[in-house]
Amino acid sequence: MSETPQASPPPASTNPARPVWTWVVWLFAAIGLLAAIAILWLMAVLFGWRLDQRQQAVVAKAGEERLFKVDDVAPLSGTNLVVIRIGLLEGGGKISSGYGQELRNVLLLDSRTGVSRRLLADNTQEISNLRFLPGGDDVERLAFAVRERKTDDHKPEVPPRYIVFQLTQPDHRDKGSSLMVSPVAAGSPVAILQGIDRIDHFDMVDATHASLIIRKRGQLHFIVVDLEARRVTEDHPIDIG
């Protein structure tokens, strides 16, 4: 009598079950990849938005070869005016940074009516050391706030009355700058001092006068300016030995 052959055992599996920790590693790797893709997408969106903003900020005046850009738009404290700073866009589309020598004009726009006034007639000269100054009783109000050591949040909103700045002709830098004074409300700026190199210090003396320390042709000067009359009332060289 023949024997019944016994069934052979099934062959061992060549793909053993993976440990659980390997699936955890793959899961975290997938999450990391998705996060990296999301970050790259977000950067692309933000970069494209900033590029659009930069391109939209460039403005050109009809008849002028040079392009100009909007450097900054900010409300003027204590007034209904908005200050729009216009900077120069260098050749080749390069946008210069900062205000300094690249600030070419300032627009004062009434936020209620939309009417604007240009500080300068054109954009051919450079503005620096731009300051908006109070006048009249507002100077004493601001001085009292400083004496009482009030924080910025509690200082009174003092509406500026005067605009003071340096004006330079780019093609004649060797001749220095002019010190300009203009009322905020209306009127054109007036050059009250010419041939200055820079302004080192500025302070309000009283309701209508300001004192400055300037450099003029390589020498320090102390001057006092009558902002209302728009003229220099004192000019003393400072001896530095």
Image (spheres, rainbow, N blue to C red):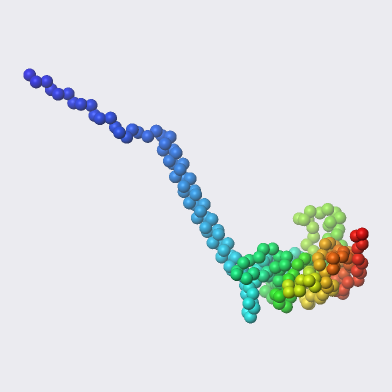
The residue sitting at 76% across, 74% down in the picture is 172
Placement of 219 over or under 189, stated as above or below: above
Numbered circles on residues, count: 0
Pick the quarter of the image with the N terminus: top left
Residue 17 placement, left or right of 171: left
Residue 184: where, in percent of width, then height? 78, 72
Pick the quarter of the image with the C terminus: bottom right
The residue sitting at 84% across, 68% down in the picture is 217
Evaluate whether residue 29 shows in this view.
yes
Residue 195: where, in percent of width, then height? 83, 72
| Furthest residue in direction left, as rendered | 1
Evaluate whether residue 141 shows in this view.
no
Placement of 187 over or under 3, stated as above or below: below
Write down the quadrant of residue 5 in the picture.
top left
Residue 47: where, in percent of width, then height? 55, 59
Of 84 and 192, the residue lying toward us = 192
Residue 105 placement, left or right of 194: left
| Furthest residue in direction bottom, as rendered | 63
Of 71 and 137, the residue lying toward us = 71
Residue 13 placement, left or right of 22: left
Residue 11: where, in percent of width, then height? 25, 30
Write down the quadrant of residue 239 in the picture.
bottom right
Of 150 and 62, the residue lying toward us = 62
The residue sitting at 81% across, 67% down in the picture is 197
Residue 25 placement, left or right of 150: left
The residue sitting at 91% across, 69% down in the picture is 234
Write down the quadrant of residue 27 in the picture.
top left
